């Protein structure tokens, strides 16, 4: 638990510094930007909650390779948006592994070492609202890049901030 807290505080600080940066100038940010384009099914440059949760469901299904409706750490760590290659290129594979463990622990709210569908959806829901700074039920590109926990965690790992 102590380890988790040591991470969360720098993550929060990193997130505040990114909020002033609307340009994308790192591979991690560019990848997050590409994913934003995938989630935004009706391209209007913001993601509504339906799009966000639909995307979450398809990610959950992709991760759950043995189709038992839960995701264990092995399944979770095998799935990769592309951040892993960037971490390897940047010589930061250990930081990436740590970020994955932290994210897994966040999703696994009851700590039974597996993520159930309800846990996953509850966290997606909470993360959407955390990122939606103006509470308009839509995530703009900036809100998504700077406020969504997954992006913050992986980018912090990749960029060493
Ligand atoms: Ca599974
Ligand atoms: Ca669980
Ligand atoms: Ca918003």
Image (spheres, grey):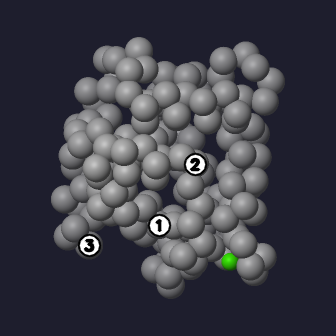
Q: Earlier in the sequence, mark 2 or mark 3?
A: 3
Tag 1 near tag 3, CB within 8 Å: no
CA gap between label 1 and label 3 equals: 13 Å
Please name the residue shown 72% across and 72% down the image.
65
Q: Quadrant of residue 34?
A: top right
Q: Regarding ligand 1, which quadrant of the image does it lie in? A: bottom right
Q: Nearer the viewer, residue 80 or 48?
A: 80
Q: Earlier in the sequence, mark 1 or mark 3?
A: 3
Query: Is 160 above or below relative to 33?
Result: below
Per the image, label 2 sits on a secondary structure element best described as loop
Residue 8 % position (x, y): 27, 53
The residue carrying pointer 1 sits among few (fewer than 14), some (14 to 19) or many (20 or more) residues within 10 Å by Cα, namely many
The tag on residue 104 is 1
The residue carrying pointer 3 sits among few (fewer than 14), some (14 to 19) or many (20 or more) residues within 10 Å by Cα, namely few
Quarter holding the N terminus?
A: bottom left
Residue where numbered disc 2 is placed: 81
The tag on residue 1 is 3
Please name the residue shown 67% across and 27% down the image.
37
Per the image, label 1 sits on a secondary structure element best described as helix
Per the image, label 3 sits on a secondary structure element best described as loop
CA gap between label 1 and label 2 equals: 15 Å
Nearer the observer: mark 1 or 3; the answer is 1
Can I make out residue 73 in this image? yes
Please name the residue shown 41% across and 15% down the image.
23
Residue 73 % position (x, y): 51, 75
């Amino acid at each position: 638990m102590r380890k988790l807290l040591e991470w969360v505080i720098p993550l929060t600080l990193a997130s505040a510094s990114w909020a002033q940066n609307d340009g994308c100038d790192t591979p991690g940010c560019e990848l997050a930007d590409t994913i934003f384009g995938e989630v935004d099914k009706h391209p209007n440059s913001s993601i509504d909650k339906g799009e966000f949760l639909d995307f979450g469901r398809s990610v959950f299904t992709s991760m759950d390779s043995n189709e038992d409706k839960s995701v264990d750490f092995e399944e979770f760590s095998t799935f990769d948006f592309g951040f892993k290659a960037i971490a390897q290129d940047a010589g930061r594979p250990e930081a990436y592994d740590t970020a994955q463990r932290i994210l897994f622990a966040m999703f696994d709210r009851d700590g039974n070492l597996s993520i159930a569908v309800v846990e996953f959806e509850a966290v997606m829901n909470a993360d959407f609202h955390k990122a939606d700074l103006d509470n308009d039920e839509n995530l703009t590109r900036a809100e998504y890049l700077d406020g969504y926990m997954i992006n913050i965690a992986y980018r912090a790992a990749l960029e060493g901030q």
